[in-house]
Image (spheres, rainbow, N blue to C red):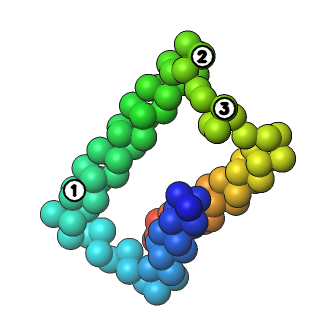
Amino acid sequence: MKGAVAAVVDMVYAGLGVAGASWLLEIDTLRVTLGVTGAVVLARVGLRTLWSAFGIRLGGEVEEEVASPRRALNAASALAIVGFAGVLGWRTLRAD
């Protein structure tokens, strides 16, 4: 589900870039607000990742959390596609 949400958000960013909405980033308050929000989200994701990594390192995962190799490959493939879509979306926003 998280991957689908990320894909939708990336597509919205790409659509805004194609629609010519990059002028919105010229508004200082909006640019700073989006930047701080993005930084907070990235910090939260990073901290949750570290917390999860320590749990796994210490053997704290349960059987339901350990997926099959097929599911891991599918998840990695989906995330790679979503990441590439995000790069394209930001590239269109910054195509001044």
Relative to 47, 92 lies left or right: right
Visible residue check, residue 17? no
Is 30 placed left or right of 83 in the picture? left
Q: Nearer the viewer, mark 2 or mark 3?
A: 3
**Residue, far left:** 29
Most foreground residue, 73 or 82: 73
Dot 3, how many residues are within 10 Å of its Cα: few (below 14), some (14-19), or many (20+)? Answer: few
Q: Real-space Cα distance between discs 2 and 3?
A: 11 Å
Q: Residue flagged by tag 3: what amino acid is it?
A: Glu
**Which residue is labeled 1 in the image?**
32
Give the residue displayed 34% in from the left and 51% down from the top: 38
SS at mark 2 in the image:
loop
Few, some or many residues within 10 Å of mark 1 (<14, 14–19, 20+) = few
Quadrant for the N terminus in the image: bottom right
Task: Examine the image and state in which quarter residue 45 appears.
Answer: top left
- In the drawing, what numbered circle is on residue 54? none
Q: CA distance from mark 1 to mark 3?
A: 43 Å
User: How far apart are the alpha carbons under marks 1 and 2?
Assistant: 41 Å
- Locate residue 14, reporting x and y percent: 52, 74
Give the quarter of the image for residue 29. bottom left
Q: Residue under circle 2?
A: 59
Q: Secondary structure at mark 1?
A: helix
Horizontal side of residue 65 vs 69, given as left or right: left
Among numbered discs 1 and 3, the one appearing first in the sequence: 1
Q: Is residue 69 at all visible to an observer of this figure?
A: yes
Tag 3, which secondary structure?
A: helix
Name the residue beneath numbered marker 3. 63
Residue 35, position in %: x, y? 29, 53
